[in-house]
Image (cartoon, rainbow, N blue to C red):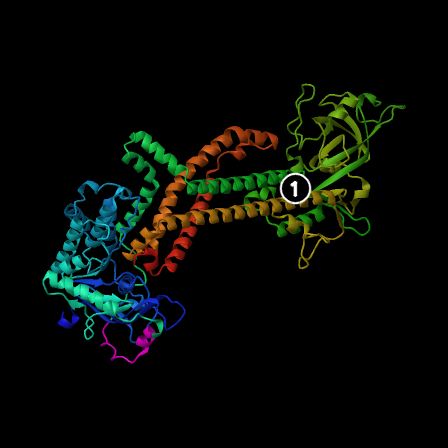
Amino acid sequence: MTAGDDWVLKAERLGCVYADNGSGNQPSSGVYADKFTLPRGQVTAIIGESGSGKSTLLSILAGLRKPNRLNDQSHLLYRGKDGRVWDQLRENRPPPGEIAFVFQEAQLIKAIPARANAKMAGHISNKGNAGELARDLAQDFELGPQWDKLSETLSGGQAQRIAIIRALCVEPNLIVCDEPTSSLDKTMSQNVIEALRWWTHETGCAVLWVTHELDLAAHYADRVALVSSGRVYCDAETGQPWTLEAPYEERLDILHDLIEQGRKQPALTVEALDRMIDRPGDAAPDEMELAQAPRWRPGSLRSYGFVVNCAVDEVSLGMRRAVAAGSNRIWAHLRGLYQAMTRSLTLILFLGLTVFYFVALGRNVTEAALNAQLSQPSMSHFTMRTVYNGGQTLDIASLGVLDKTLFDAAPIAAEASDKARRVFGRRVHEQQYLWFPDESKDGTCNTRPLDGIEPYIRTMQVFDAREPLFEDLSFPAWNGVEADPEWRTRPGILATQGFMETFRIEAGQEICLELFNRTIGLPVLGVAEEFPGGGERKYPLAVTELVYHDLFLEAPPDNFVQNGKITLPTYREAAVYFDKTSFENVVCKFPDMPECTPDETPVLFGFKLDQDILNQVRGMLRAMDGASVSFAVLSWTFAATIVISTALATAAFVQRNEKSIAVMKAFGYTVAHMAMMIQTQIAVLLCFAIFWFLGLHWIFQTYAAPYAANAFDLPVEWLAMKQGLFWRAFIAVFLLSLLVTVVVIGTWWRKNRYLSETLQTI
């Protein structure tokens, strides 16, 4: 490196006005550096009276404040250890570990031990020996007993020494110090500055030091620059601070003289600053190759481990405070656990888990109850009849066509193909004459009743045993006689209990009836309380379609035989089955249906549908849709509430730890580090929220669920713990909190691109 390259910082034509009084020719708070070059391997002190702009200049040179008065010749260059040059005006900051900071206040992270704060910069700069160097410096600065203590228990002087160790242990190329000894006693101040001076001379790096203590500056500074009334004074030709080579007493006199001369200089005005910025200047500096910072510095695993430990330590701070205060360790752990579990963010997360889980459970239970009701055969079908004038005939052939049409409209899964039929015919055999064998002439059903005995007239229902409404038809024992298990296929008749009681007959007893213009005897194969499918009409007798079909074919009436072809009687009505998903497709095959859009063309005409059952189904479907919408609105409402609450809690955490976060950013930690720190804390608190949730669910399962199941006639297992719902609620809360964390910390990060105002003292 040549002599001309022997610099760390080089600034030209930089101005900053931060408290304009509104008049261009009146003094304003600001600072202007026409030319400033910081040499390598020396301690440079910046002196000046309070309010002169020293800290503002320091923050601009360190890249912590953005200058707002610039021109085309303005530049702020930083030369790294490896000779690469970075232009900080282009927001092109050098990598972590190049520049370290010591502020007036220590700005430690209170929740972690002193040793962790000291090593913080070393983690992000990935210095392998940072920990060992930090321990050695702690011994030199007499911090051995405080090394493992909580940072919040340190005195101001002890905390400031930790901050100085934090800066030194990364072996930076430049240390920026703003009144680093303001909270130290005289002896320790001398020790700290002596350590900085020794480090500078040994490593060939630089220290830029703002101080009011002229005696310390006279003792330890190699060079000095003056800031007075917003103007920066140094060597006008080179821009380098003046060299201090005289003995101590002469140095001190020089510094006092500089302060006195500065008082005589006119105050900087906005108008004067703008003139200096805009005046013609020297030729632009020689072109040099500038290093380019990567758009993203992911950081080392060690740095992410550090922020995770910070988050865990912050959550467990109450416990460690109790331990540090000398409390019983078990009691201290319980106390700390209780404090963590009762934090506002823990309760917000618990509320989120609870709301998402029970809203989802309520939606599932509501839908299950409505689906269970809709899946009942009595609700999952409607009946249809032909219109008498010109209507289609309901026979076997037309039912097949109708079934195929509906099947094409709403296909059924292949595994259900054996039950794929959707349309079933129903018959009613009106004015059925019947009697009993002992009332006939020969004591059998081969002859009609004796003279004087009028046959009974009853209506008989004919149904398809494969129809879902009749699949679960049960026949309890009647007077100790079990029903025939082959009742679906064996020739026989089915009767209601009322019929059996009226005629005082037993199961299995034969009944004589006139069917298809002939008399026939059929045994009673089963006795039911009543037969479904009749609507308001109740049929005392029934026979299956298969038995009816076989009896008809045995001796078909002549009027049903034409040209040797037998035609079965038509059905009185047909039952059409559907489910929730196929309802609209099915009914839209018929005209004048309110569910259907104009582009859905009906294909089935000439039928009259049972509107009562359709209206019931429509009401249930509307209830299901309404319940889904209501639960969705409820979920989104609570989600918004939880997001806002989490955002407020996260923002409060950021505000509470703003200075610590700002210091971490200054040392090179990224928004990803901060987001991980906050999200780790939320993850830990979410574990406590799960504990509260499991306790609440146990109470619900033990006491509330049985009562609710009984009150609403629900299976109690519907209200049992659903792991799928729980994990969905957990993921929803975690992802919402992650989103909130990224938004909150990202917003703070963009707002605090420059950190001088956040750190206040710079």
| Residue displayed at 46% across by 44% down | 728
Which of the 4 image quadrants contains residue 672? bottom left
Query: Tag count in the figure?
Result: 1
| Residue displayed at 49% across by 39% down | 354
Figure check: 677 above or below 262: above
* Residue 513 in view: yes
Residue 181 place in picture, x, y as percent: 21, 53
Which of the 4 image quadrants contains residue 518? top right
Residue 544 place in picture, x, y as percent: 70, 35
Figure check: 416 above or below 514: below
Q: Mark 1 points at which residue?
A: 380
Figure check: 485 above or below 480: below
The residue nearer to you, when weighing 460 against 281, is 281
Residue 305 place in picture, x, y as percent: 28, 48
Magenta span contains residue 273: yes
The residue nearer to you, when weighing 186 against 425, is 186
* Residue at the right extreme of this rendering: 452
SS assignment at label 1: loop
* Residue 755 in view: no
The residue nearer to you, when weighing 624 against 362, is 362
Residue 621 place in picture, x, y as percent: 64, 45
**The magenta segment:** 272-289
Q: What residue type is labelled 1?
A: Ser
The residue nearer to you, when weighing 671 against 520, is 671
Q: Quadrant of the N terminus?
A: bottom left
The rendered magenta stretch, by its main secondary structure, is classed as: loop
